[in-house]
Image (cartoon, grey):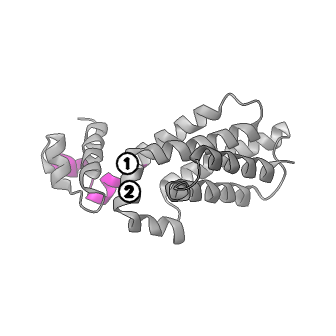
């Protein structure tokens, strides 16, 4: 049995009841495996859910990166990828469930520490920044600080887009985000 089967079952459970209420017993039942089979792969429910988030959100970030891949400069690729990431994450059922049902579980990743998915995203941003310095499309600066700043901008849009677009067109707001990132990174 692959981890994907177990993670798919975990995804179903989270979509049904949220992160906090998902249990190893329910994940095992959904995957049609014994709890011991699940325990052999994951020591606790937190590790299953962490693996699920890393898999799901990592795949979305990869898709977002692919959407920006055709742009002529690294700056444009970064901006397009960032906008795609916000759009894809906001449209994702799992992200919506986490934001809607288990909002307080996101708080440590906003005010206390960066999580695995944030670090993956920051590394992708950093690669774009390095490529942009090489092709001359991104200004010089403190690379770790620039990468973190871009991550924080994108993260704020991921978490706030729905609330921020109750009275605004989401496309218009994402266009503004693109303009801000583009202007901030220009040489």
| Depicted 51 relative to depicted 104: above or below | above
Question: Secondary structure beneath disc 1?
Answer: helix
Q: Nearer the viewer, residue 71 or 114?
A: 71
Q: Quadrant of residue 21?
A: bottom left
| Depicted 29 relative to depicted 100: above or below | above
Q: Horizontal and vertical percent for residue 28?
A: 17, 47
User: Which SS type dominates the magenta stretch?
Assistant: helix
Question: Secondary structure beneath disc 2?
Answer: helix
Q: Nearer the viewer, residue 180 or 29?
A: 180
Location of the N terminus (image quadrant): top left
According to the image, label 2 marks what residue?
98
Q: Residue furthest front?
A: 167
Side of 42 relative to 100 (left or right)? left
Q: Is 146 colored magenta in this rendering? A: no
Return the mark for residue 17. none
Q: Is 44 colored magenta in this rendering? A: yes
Which span of residues is magenta-colored? 36-53
């Amino acid at each position: 049995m692959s981890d994907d089967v177990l993670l798919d079952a975990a995804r179903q459970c989270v979509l049904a009841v949220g992160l906090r209420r998902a249990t190893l017993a329910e994940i095992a039942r959904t995957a049609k495996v014994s709890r011991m089979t699940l325990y052999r792969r994951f020591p606790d429910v937190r590790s299953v859910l962490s693996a699920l988030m890393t898999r799901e959100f990592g795949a979305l970030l990869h898709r977002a990166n692919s959407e920006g891949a055709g742009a002529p400069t690294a700056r444009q690729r970064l901006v397009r990828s960032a906008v795609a990431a916000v759009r894809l994450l906001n449209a994702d059922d799992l992200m919506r469930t986490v934001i809607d049902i288990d909002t307080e579980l996101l708080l440590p990743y906003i005010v206390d520490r960066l999580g695995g998915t944030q670090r993956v995203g920051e590394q992708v941003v950093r690669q774009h920044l390095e490529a942009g310095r090489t092709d001359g499309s991104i200004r010089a600066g403190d690379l770790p600080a620039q990468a973190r700043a871009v991550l924080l901008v994108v993260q704020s849009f991921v978490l706030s887009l729905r609330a921020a677009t109750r009275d605004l067109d989401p496309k218009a707001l994402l266009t503004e985000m693109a303009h801000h990132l583009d202007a901030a990174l220009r040489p």
